[in-house]
Image (cartoon, rainbow, N blue to C red):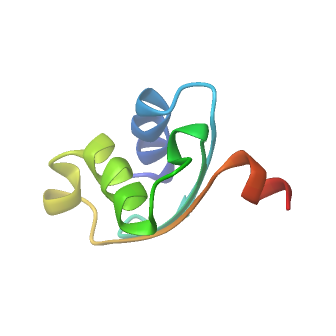
Amino acid sequence: MEPEDIKRMIEDAFPQDTVEVEGDGQHFQALVVSSQFEGKGLLERHKMVYAALGENMAERIHALSLKTLTPEQWEG
């Protein structure tokens, strides 16, 4: 799996939001900035991103480090 594949899947669930993904094919780092995260805790935000990736989290992605921010947090 390539970083671009993961980015595309996350963007499908978070359209018009900021998504950046880097990685080496097994270990990935993602930044997701979305207004959908407002009022949600860290665990809830991560679950939202994991849901966007579906079965790939168990089958194709070995490790994913997430940074999930609201637009206000990103600008601060």
Q: How many numbered callouts?
A: 0
Task: Report the residue at 22% width, 58% height from top.
Answer: 57
Q: Is 27 in front, or is 45?
A: 45
Q: Tell me, yes or no, if residue 43 can be seen here.
A: yes
Q: For the view shown, which residue lies furthest in the right direction?
A: 76
* In-image side of 56 versus 37 (left or right): left
Up-down relation of residue 25 to residue 70 (above or below): below
Q: Quadrant of residue 64?
A: bottom left
Q: Quadrant of the C terminus?
A: bottom right
Task: Report the residue at 35% width, 48% height from top.
Answer: 48
Up-down relation of residue 20 to residue 11 (above or below): below
Q: Is 39 in front, or is 61?
A: 39
* In-image side of 57 versus 70 (left or right): left
- The x and y percentages for residue 63 are 33, 73
Q: Tell me, yes or no, if residue 1 can be seen here.
A: no
Task: Report the residue at 44% width, 40% height from top.
Answer: 10
- The x and y percentages for residue 15 are 54, 26
Q: Is 76 in front, or is 17?
A: 76
Up-down relation of residue 2 to residue 61 (above or below): above
Q: For the view shown, which residue lies furthest in the front direction?
A: 39
- The x and y percentages for residue 49 are 38, 50
- The x and y percentages for residue 29 are 52, 67
Task: Report the residue at 14% width, 58% height from top.
Answer: 59
